[in-house]
Image (cartoon, grey):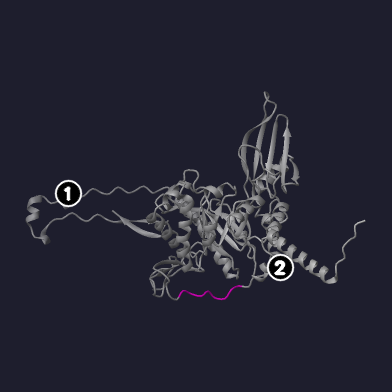
Amino acid sequence: MKAVPKYSALSRLLLLLGLLVFSSVVARSIKIYSSEEDYSAGYQPKIVCYISAGNEQYDYNSLRPGLCTHFILIDLIGLNSEGKLLLFQKSSRALKYFLDLRNRFKHVGDPARFILAVGGVGQKSSHFSRALSYDPSRNTAVDNIVAFLTKHRFDGVDIAWFYPGQYGGRKCDKLTLVLFLRALQSRLQTYDASLSLTVGVDPRDLEISYDVAKIDKYIDFVNILTGDYHDPQKPSHISPLLPGDGKDRLNIQNSIKSYIKAGLNPQKTVILLSNYGYLYEQRLCSKTGKFVLKNVQRLTKLGARELIERENFHISWDDSRQVPYATLVDGSGKKWITFNSVESHRRKAEFTLLNQLGGVGSFTLDQDDYEGYASSGSYPMLWAIVDVIRPEARAASYNPAAAYNPIEICPHTGNISHPTCSYCYYECQEGVPPVEQSPTVPSSSAPTDTSSTKTPTNATDQRRRRRRRNCRLMDLLRKPMAPEKPTPAPSSRNQPLFPMLNRLLPPSLRNSPPEPQRRPVNMNLFNVNVYRN
């Protein structure tokens, strides 16, 4: 037998130390960050909550403070080909509600930041490309965005350009986006406003649309649309966490690795989770014997839950991709629903903490069950994220903040919104104290009697007053009017005998006809007497 060499105690100690050093190096090469580094540097993951301006039925008052660290209002404004702001929605009520939500949260001490998104699903990529390709129009776009931001006192801007260099864009859009972010970030630094970017999920987009290493220098965080991987050509999962096989590239894990490998800081990476799903309807083809896709329909979280319960879908769980799905086979038809659940959201939030990413986003809050119709409480999808990222939010309480610090000196020339009144604003000249303006307050300094005319407090009071006024008017029209007495004809003795000769006489001797009598007409609608001939 071969003799086994004997090692001294010192040799064994040196060998053990070498193994420990080697294992630590390998662990650091696999791990993005070590936990000691992150928490010593104050690592705090974000919860980014999107709200769509296109949903006018959403109840902003259903939100409570302490859940989201960032709110982003999307689908409100974009850019046209000249660099001017383009309003997507005909009504700006979403902007008013969003600003009221900000004032309400700041009043109770919630430090959440409220951000305006420029662009969105309704924004054409060609408009971004034309507006930002040249210096004059690019500077115009930056000036308009900063002016809108400072007027309404937003805390930041999110650029939602889908997708540079594609869908009518140009090959130079990849560089154009970097130049635009650099110009915008230099202006936003003056106002202590953040800059973020919403990007696509396909790793192939990195080659065409995004120079990630340069983008990382100018933005505060990047929102990756990992909530929607669905394929409109065939049934597919909307937001798989892990790949199903080695060739599957459309999943959250692969997208995050691609962006980090391209140069994105992991703590600037925010994964967006969708609150909607898709319904795939298939029909059996008699010739081939295979199912053919006939229709694809988008569903909200509440709509998907209602359809599954009404038609008795069979719910399954994909262990490899960590997502749920529902199926229904009825004769020659087949329905397949891909959606997210509370469990899938919870696992993705745990994935974020495990890899020490920048945070998780909810896209969008108005598609969640915010009224709690089909759940034990409101916002079940949002709470699945909050319970993992910010578990202390369950017992958090917020005290009303102290008085607002009024603006003493105007930072720029123009109008600035009021911190507590959504209808008020300040007229500013740079370097001069502001002048507060309130359209609802009479401009005259004299006291007015408001006891007889009260301003309606809400839309219900306005409708009631309008209905009572119309009823009084209809009663007045239905009331039979008394026949008018015929006016007696003027007597001949009051008429001048010779009109020409009458004009030559002095005024005191002229024979002029009497003035017609004026009779009062009672207008009960206004309670005043109006005279007519």
Q: Position of residue 190 (x, y in %)?
A: 46, 68
Nearest the camera: 476 or 251?
Answer: 251
Q: Tell me the quarter of the image containing the N terminus.
A: bottom right
Name the residue at 61% across, 64% down: 69
Is residue 97 visible in the rendered structure shown here?
A: no
Label 1 or label 2, whichever lies nearer to me, is 2
Q: Secondary structure at mark 1?
A: helix
Q: Quadrant of residue 236?
A: top right
Name the residue at 39% across, 51% down: 82
Residue range highlighted in magenta: 400-407
Main secondary-structure element of the magenta-colored stretch: loop
- The numbered disc on residue 395 is 2
Q: Secondary structure at mark 2?
A: helix
* In the rendered image, the vertical position of residue 158 relative to residue 404, given as above or below: above
- The numbered disc on residue 492 is 1
Please rate how many residues cluster around mark 1, counting C-alpha atoms within 10 Å: few if below 14, some from 14 to 19, many from 20: few
- The numbered disc on residue 221 is none
Q: Position of residue 308 (x, y in %)?
A: 71, 42
Q: Position of residue 530 (x, y in %)?
A: 34, 58
Q: Is residue 404 magenta?
A: yes
Q: Position of residue 275 (x, y in %)?
A: 64, 51
* In the rendered image, the vertical position of residue 1 relative to residue 339, given as above or below: below
The amino acid type of the residue labelled 2 equals Ala
Q: Would residue 284 appear left or right of 437 to someone viewing this image? A: right
The amino acid type of the residue labelled 1 equals Ser
- Measure the C-alpha gap from mark 1 to mark 2: 98 Å
